[in-house]
Image: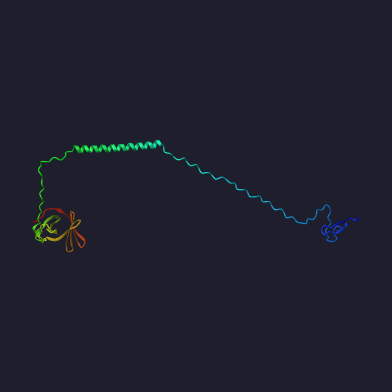
Amino acid sequence: MTTTWRCSLCDVWNATADTSCQCCDTARRTAADPPPALFFAPPPRPVIPPPPRPVMRPLPLPPPMPPPAYRSSSSSGFTGCMIAVLTVALLCTLVLLLALLAGARARAPASAPQSNSPIVTTPAVQAVACPDRVALLIPDDSAELVAAYDAGDKHIVICRTATGELYYYGQYIGQDGTGLLMPAQETAAGLLARNGAYLYEIRGDEVVVSVDGHEILREFLVATSPRFP
């Protein structure tokens, strides 16, 4: 009996002495050779380990709330007692003061005793007439003396009429022909008189003379009586 072998690829029978297939030239497979692979297996996929799971840590708990502070009943009671004691003391003091005041009024005499001393009356001050030398220059005949001053080598007389008008009279001491009369008016500082561009102002205890707003003279005033009749 002739031994043959069959090709595993084209299924053709071949002679025993043939080492390859006469049809497809496929090499003869022996029993030791592994069978041909009909399919190519894909390479194995790398095994990727799963990512580690995050560790869930518990959140920290808030600190415990301190217990509410309770006022001691003893301290509140002590405060209330002190307030009551002070109130009573204040009321007692007020009552005592009222009692003392009532007693003082009761001991006071009903009316002051009448004095037998005579009543002293102050005589009325009589107005001094303006000096004749000045009064003759004033239109009003009933002018009264207001004041008289010495200012350095000058003498100043102030007179007022019955209608309230003021006059300023000034002259050099001992020089009768140098007198000058000017209408005047009261100011917050004293008195003001004007003669053209010249301004005569009495400020307290000084007299200031200025021309066109520029001060040219300042003298200290000394109250005196008129130097002429």
Q: Nearer the viewer, residue 94 or 173?
A: 94
Q: Residue at x 24, y 38 (%)?
A: 98
Give x and y (percent) for residue 190.
Answer: 18, 56
Q: Residue furthest bottom?
A: 196
Give x and y (percent) for residue 118.
Answer: 9, 43
Q: Is residue 125 above or below residue 184?
A: above
Give x and y (percent) for residue 127.
Answer: 10, 54
Q: Is residue 104 above or below residue 223?
A: above
Q: Quadrant of residue 139?
A: bottom left
Q: Residue at x 15, y 53 (%)?
A: 222
Q: Residue at x 40, y 36 (%)?
A: 73
Give the number of marks: 0
Q: Nearer the viewer, residue 219 or 9?
A: 9
- Image quadrant occupied by the C terminus: bottom left
Give x and y (percent) for residue 100.
Answer: 23, 37
Q: Which colouring convention does the figure follow?
A: rainbow
- Image quadrant occupied by the N terminus: bottom right
